[in-house]
Image (cartoon, rainbow, N blue to C red):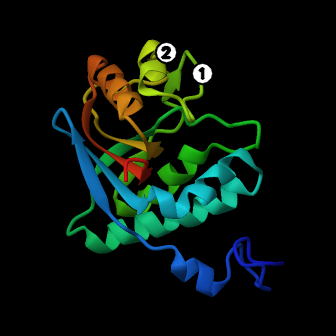
Amino acid sequence: MRCLLCGNWTFYTFCKNCFNAIHITPRYREIKGFKIYSFFAFGEIEYLLHAKYQVIGSKVYGILAKKASQYLKNTLEIPLNAYAVGIDDKISTQGYAHNAILLYHLKQVGLTPLYQTLYAKNPVSYAGKSLKFRQANPRNFCLKRKVRGKEIVLVDDIVTTGLTLMEAKECLESNGGKVLNAFVLADARN
């Protein structure tokens, strides 16, 4: 098989050189006191994040999620000991749920995944849309399982304006959950 990035022969999705070239660049932003931690510079992995629209995306997201969770594991002094809820982690037409992949890998840092918990009643795509469009078309989240009394970390692939995460946080907290922070693969605000 050939490396997805450079085309050299490899037994893996990416050759060793390309895998090592994907750098963790951790940062966080705060919205109304809510911290959103990201692991990669959006501009450096944007083309990889777009793989979620293809079948190979599950492999790409697995690699990114593994790198992010390994970084987190190496920097934490103690396990997180909370629950993780993905934004709309339902199976796509490509046959996998990209946020569920990140939830799975975050188990190694002490987060217990609550799969298929938070769904958008409005399945509108925000990709490439303006802040005005996003504000006019909220996701209208609903819960599929109880979160009362649970400490939760929200999980998503990209944060752009933060509206989705803040709406998800509000839904979880109005149902008795305590949302601690969020982990995303990349922050689109460079």
Disc 2 versus disc 1: nearer the observer: 2
Q: Residue at x 53, y 79 (%)?
A: 21
| CB-based contact (under 8 Å), mark 2 and mark 1 | no
For marks 2 and 1, the one nearer the N-term is: 1
Check disc 1 and report the residue beneath it.
123
Residue 189 screen position, x and y as percent: 37, 47
Residue 181: x percent and y percent?
A: 27, 43
The relative height of residue 17 versus residue 82 in the rendered view (above or below) is below
Which numbered circle lies on residue 92?
A: none
Which SS class for mark 2?
A: loop
Residue 137: give its label. Answer: 2
Residue sitting nearer the eye, 172 or 3? 3
Please indicate whether residue 146 sits to the left or right of residue 11 in the image: left
Q: Amino acid at mark 2?
A: Asn
Badge 2: residue crowd in 10 Å (few <14, some 14–19, many ≥20): some
- Check disc 1 and give the amino acid type: Pro
Q: Vertically, is 112 above or below 69?
A: above
The structure residue drawn at horizontal position 27% and vertical position 61%, both measured from the top left corner, is 79
Image location (x, y in percent) of residue 160:
42, 40
Residue in the picture at 36% in, 67% down: 25
